[in-house]
Image (cartoon, rainbow, N blue to C red):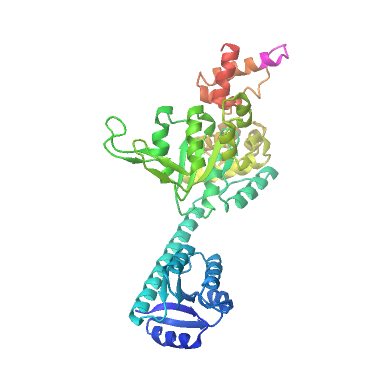
Amino acid sequence: MKYGTILIVDDNEDVLFALNLLLKPHFEKVKVSTTPERIAHFMATDAPEVILLDMNFSRDASSGQEGMEVLQGILARDPEAVVVMMTAYSDMDKAIAAIKAGATDFVAKPWENEKLVATLTAAAKLSRARREKASLQEQMRTMAQSAVPPIIGRSAAMVQLMDMVERLAQTDANILILGENGTGKDLVARALHGYSARAAHPLVTIDLGSIPESLFEGELFGYEKGAFTDTRTAKAGRMEVASGGTLFLDEIGNLSMPLQAKLLSAIEKGVFTRIGSTKEQRIDVRLICATNSPLHERVTEGTFRQDLLYRINTIELHIPPLRERGNDVLLLADYFVDLYKRKYRKEVDGLNAEAREKLMRYTWPGNVRELQHAVERAVILSDRRTLGAQLFALRPTPAARKVQTATLNLEQLERTAIAEALRTAEGNINRAAELLGITRYALYRKMEKYGL
């Protein structure tokens, strides 16, 4: 079996001639050069599987420093390049230095033919394995990108947001996504991951609003067998599963102060320990967080750690509410009509003029999520080819109702709005907070303030 191309770089032409004869039976092409300056050309045109590089050229005959600098240049051009170093002045210090610098192996002059061939064919196998792995990861990235749902919008704010997502996806910066409930924070997180170099690795999501505090550490860090009563098997935590990929912490504003400290420690150190274990594990994750909570205000109030906020918001992305996105309402409605008519196999052409006007007048307190549910319901109930306004049972919200009161006292207006939201939500705190556009914790504080 012959391997692909090998590039030999040595300033001794007799050495190049001898190696050319020796290696021709084992490689399809043997390329040679007496100067390192030609390496970039050969890498661009021949894509050698292996580069056999002398450690000493014109500068001196024994230090190996010039070869080490050339090695660094090769790896800067292609971090996956397989380079075998060679020198007539072999010693362990040079071998160790070359390996630490990124060389695959090290051989000495004069060489033993069989040993040299074995070393170089092993290096060629390694090169193929690396390139096959890179090709597979690229295929997986492409698949992941094709699976990312589209972010729909032509409003100025959404165009700016999509431009930021495209630019930030190629970085490893920690991102904090801010926006009201239902605006699509999870969709933006999936886009940031799907268009990144980490797309071939997992995107692991933790909804911090749905995990009881007592289970948080086990979910995030995992645990060993016997860590708790009746735990008969070990479990990897979400952070461990996400290593190499992206960890998306949704509703991070729901974390209590003690849990904020534990998360901060793991992020700062880049290591974690499973519950019941003493062994630290290093992690490599890109962190994306999302919340509808005003974290900067929470820091001032003392309910969110400032040092954690600094760690998670290298860049902040703000998703505008649907009521501020103009004609994006109709773009999204048309998208959802097309989606659900195919899902439910309904012959629906779209919205009539009255329905479109009604959707544009509505304030959408539940944002895109509420619009999606409204369109799905309308498609299901429709018995005509066009969707009419009567199919959209949109309830007026506290923000849209005229408050029947003679007072303009702000506290009284706020108390009335909260009471109305609780009535509309039938006591469901999460739903009431969503209607008011505030967090559950903020609603609890206001209810306590007004005795509701």
Name the side, left or right, on which 104 lies relative to 437: left
Question: Residue at left 63%, top 31%?
Answer: 296
Q: Report the front residue among 301 and 280.
A: 280
Q: Report the front residue among 289 and 59.
A: 59
Q: Main secondary structure of the magenta part?
A: loop
Q: Quadrant of the N terminus?
A: bottom left
Q: Is residue 304 magenta?
A: no
Quadrant of residue 294 within the rendered picture? top right
Q: Position of residue 255 (x, y in %)?
A: 50, 30
Please say if 91 is above or below 374.
Answer: below
Please say if 281 is above or below 405.
Answer: below
> What is the span of residues highlighted in magenta in the rendered image?
404-413
Please say if 239 is above or below 302.
Answer: below
**Is residue 396 at least partly visible in the picture?**
no
Question: Residue at left 68%, top 19%?
Answer: 402
Q: Position of residue 448 (x, y in %)?
A: 56, 14
Question: Residue at left 41%, top 68%?
Answer: 92
Q: Position of residue 337 (x, y in %)?
A: 55, 43
User: Looking at the image, how many numbered discs can be counted on the residues?
Assistant: 0
Q: Quadrant of the C terminus?
A: top right
Q: Position of residue 27 (x, y in %)?
A: 41, 81
Q: Report the front residue among 260 and 55.
A: 55
Name the side, left or right, on which 227 lies relative to 399: left
**Is residue 317 at least partly visible in the picture?**
yes
Name the side, left or right, on which 314 lies relative to 122: right
Question: Residue at left 50%, top 87%?
Answer: 13
